[in-house]
Image (spheres, rainbow, N blue to C red):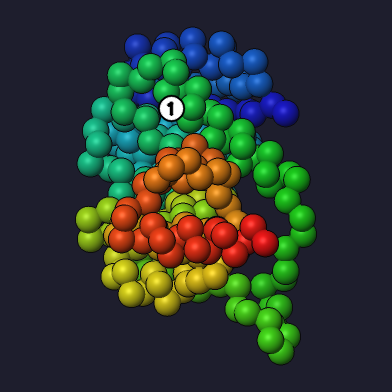
Amino acid sequence: MKISCIAVDDEPLALDILREYCAKVPFLNLQCTFDNALETLEYLRNNSVDLLLLDIQMEDLTGIQLLNALKTKPYVILTTAYDNYALQGFELDVADYLLKPISFERFVRGIDKVYERMLKEKTAPAIKPENHVPAAGEAQDYFFVKTETRIEKITTSEVLYVEGMGDYWRIVTTNRRIMTLMNARGIEENLHEPRFCRVHKSWFVAIDKIDFVERKHIKIRDQRIPVSDTYLKNFFDIIEKRKK
């Protein structure tokens, strides 16, 4: 599977680095590069790509403003020297957030995330239509959370884990990440046993998404999640029941 992409950065050196990195990844096809958001916007109105490598701080139009102007968004990896846009990045459901200077190893990890998401979308089974009405006894498989700019619908069966981050919770699903201002009780009301389990004051996990458990840690995809002593017994009780 090939990934078509474009790169946008107003720094010539940064664009040179992205060109070099893209050339090293066999399945990545860099179609063109831009040094400003306005030309990029015009290009994307007439052409489609899988991935947008996007700087944030640019003249005339920022990377964030560019994304907000797009009706149809490709996968996005933000490349920036500033870490204060991380929350906005999560709200815009970007695939990754790379801080400059970007190492090739970190770049590849970001590209791999996009590759995995694209592959999963291509192989995913058909989903229920939006107007599906649960039958008697069938659990509702979605809930809504409020972000800074809108109310997002979350499909429960797609949730991998939830991580507490200060006053926010980051909900990570099979294809996106959502930041929401919600208390732990609100999370528990939507993600409860036996399908989900709280394993730490800052972590909830989907039991069926666990790859493996090693001592006091859980592995889900590329995320290593701690299990605290407070929730240890309950978690392993649930695991034991699933083994039978």
Split into 4 quadrants, where in the image is the C terminus? bottom right
Q: Is residue 51 left or right of residue 197?
A: right
The residue under the point 49% across, 37% down is 222
Picture coordinates of residue 98 (x, y %)? 37, 30
Residue 162 seen by the camera: yes
Q: Quadrant of residue 130?
A: bottom right
Picture coordinates of residue 131 (x, y %)? 69, 78
The residue under the point 26% across, 28% down is 81
Q: Is residue 16 left or right of residue 202?
A: right
Q: Which residue is mark 1?
A: 8
Q: Nearer the viewer, residue 79 or 176?
A: 176
Looking at the rendered structure, the kind of residue marked 1 is Val
Split into 4 quadrants, where in the image is the N terminus? top right
Q: Nearer the viewer, residue 188 or 131?
A: 188
Picture coordinates of residue 54 (x, y %)? 42, 32
Residue 41 seen by the camera: no
